[in-house]
Amino acid sequence: MRLAGWQVLQQVPIWQDSRLSLAFYGMLLAGALLLGAGIIAWIRRRIANEARCLAERPEDQLTEFRNLLDLGELQREEFDKVRKVLGKKMEGAGPVSGEKKPPAPENPPASTPNP
């Protein structure tokens, strides 16, 4: 006696069907790959952001321009202009984040009374 195709499929429980388990593991693999790609993109973006922040400091910019001057790609007059502008930025920036500010005096000087 021949069984029809739909009768054979009904006899196999759904969790044991090889076609569904292949699809499940395929989706699981695709999800893991997407998660890994997302983590890699996040790390690259974070590293690029930190490098950009470091390059924006006036001290670092002045060093880059000094290197260009040493290589002969920048003239002395141009370097002096850039140094003047970056010097103003460095003066206005205050102490670098890693440096400590000088402590405030504990006892302010006593004021003299006005007669």
Image (cartoon, rainbow, N blue to C red):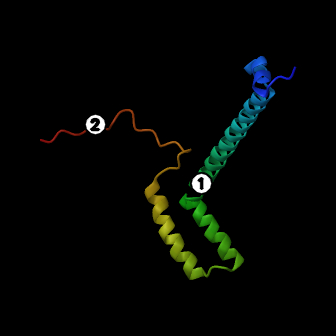
Looking at the rendered structure, the kind of residue marked 1 is Leu
Determine the residue positioned at 39% across, 33% down. 106
Looking at the rendered structure, the kind of residue marked 2 is Ala
Determine the residue positioned at 66% across, 44% down. 43
Q: Relative to 111, is 75 above or below?
A: below
Q: Horizontally, is 14 left or right of 84 in the view? A: right
Residue 78: percent from the left, percent from the top? Answer: 55, 79
Q: Which mark is residue 22?
A: none
Q: Nearer the viewer, residue 48 or 51?
A: 48
Residue furthest out toward the front: 1
Real-space Cα separation, disc 2 to disc 1, in angstroms: 44 Å
- Where is residue 107, by image quadrant? top left
Residue furthest out toward the left: 115
* Residue, disc 2: 110
Label 1 environment density (alpha carbons within 10 Å; few <14, some 14–19, many ≥20): few
Q: Nearer the viewer, residue 15 or 46?
A: 15
Residue 108: percent from the left, percent from the top? Answer: 33, 36
Determine the residue positioned at 65% across, 76% down. 69
Q: Relative to 30, is 96 above or below?
A: below
- Where is residue 60, by image quadrant? bottom right
Label 2 environment density (alpha carbons within 10 Å; few <14, some 14–19, many ≥20): few
Q: Relative to 106, is 50 above or below?
A: below
Residue 65: percent from the left, percent from the top? Answer: 61, 70
In the picture, the quarter occupied by the C terminus is top left
Question: Is there a contact, CB below 8 Å, between mark 2 and mark 1?
Answer: no
Instruction: Decide which of tag 2 and tag 1 comes sooner along the chain.
Output: 1
Secondary structure beneath label 1: helix
Secondary structure beneath label 2: loop
In the picture, the quarter occupied by the N terminus is top right
Q: Which mark is residue 54?
A: 1
Q: Nearer the viewer, residue 52 or 77?
A: 52
